[in-house]
Amino acid sequence: MAKYRRSLPLMKGGTFLSDGGMETTLIFHEGVALPHFASFVLLSTSEGRRRLLNYYTRYLDIAQHHGTGFVLDTATWRASADWGSKLGYDAGALAELNQDAVYLLTELRAEYERPQAPIVLSGAIGPRGDGYRAGRMSPDEAEDYHAAQVAAFAVSDADMISAYTITNIDEAIGIARSAQSHGMPCAISFTVETDGRLPNGRTLKHAIEIVDAATGRFPQYYMINCAHPDHFEASLDTDSAWVHRIGGIRANASAKSHSELDESETLDAGDPVELGQRYRMLSDRLPRLRILGGCCGTDHRHIAAICEACLSPTALSA
């Protein structure tokens, strides 16, 4: 039974960590083969599950050290119909894997959660298409497409749904509607290009305002992920209401564009300390920022540096 679905603790204040770039860490640091960048395939073997548990615990140890809460995302960014079909998984197998991904996290929550440091279980959803390109779906098509994955999380212990690397406003609307129809709180995380805009040229302001208008402000909050702070910080007008809807950042370590990252054969891990300082500056500009995590190229070192910059006694007194 879901523990926090009816009352998410991260909506009441406090700081919550999240993990970093799961797929880039597993591929580039650990040499794990992830076809189509799909980490959910690891759930099918005992060795794969062990790798996922080891991956998560690095971040949970950091959160425990700093006394923060944690948003624990499932390894299911690619576990939807089109991507699953490419990997030989039918609808039944995908539903089972999505639920199993949540079950893996319940074991970790039982071990790591503390009374003042709640751990929220989040079912991770990715875009139907490529996370670097603008997709084309109507809200109705998106709602129908994502319904199976949302439904799998709804009958699990997941507390909420988080949709990452969303590049299309209509797809975001469809995901939010599907979550609403299944009684699942949700967060929408947009990906932006180096100019701070979605791949189709729409601004973050426009995206958030349109999704809110179309869904009755159903998303609990919005996030920005898979972009370096250089790419979006200039677009954050702290006096605007839409900025108050941004609750989390999961930035890339690299300042390269998505096309440059696509063509790169090596991992650009950037500078963890510098990234931490950029998060510190972002926290001053985002009044509702709650979730601190990473995306492509980041690992536990980056999250530790972000904590030092944002949560250390020196940073808090600055």
Image: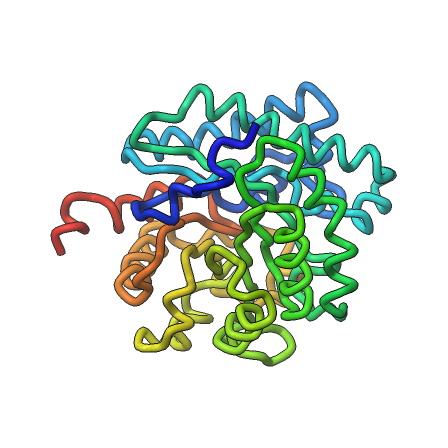
Q: Give coordinates of residue 14: x percent, y percent.
A: 30, 45
Does residue 29 appear left or right of residue 253 in this picture?
Answer: right
Q: Is residue 253 visible?
A: no
For the image shown, how many numbered marks are present on the structure?
Answer: 0
Relative to the observer, which residue lies in front, 65 or 151?
A: 151
User: Outermost residue toward the left?
Assistant: 317
Q: Give coordinates of residue 306: x percent, y percent.
A: 33, 48
Q: Quadrant of residue 166?
A: bottom right
What residue is drawn where x is 33% and y is 33%?
117
Does residue 151 appear left or right of residue 288 in this picture?
Answer: right
Does residue 82 appear left or right of residue 308 in this picture?
Answer: right
In the image, residue 132 above or below residue 160? below
User: Outermost residue toward the bottom?
Assistant: 201
In the image, residue 190 above or below residue 206? above
What residue is drawn where x is 26% and y is 50%?
310
Q: Is residue 299 visible?
A: yes
Q: Give coordinates of residue 282: x percent, y percent.
A: 32, 63
Q: Quadrant of the N terminus?
A: top right
Q: Give coordinates of residue 157: x percent, y percent.
A: 58, 31
Relative to the observer, which residue lies in front, 79 or 231?
A: 79
What residue is drawn where x is 59% and y is 65%?
215
Q: Quadrant of the C terminus?
A: bottom left
What residue is drawn where x is 39% and y is 26%?
113
Q: What colour-coding does the image apply?
A: rainbow
Does residue 211 appear left or right of residue 283 in this picture?
Answer: right
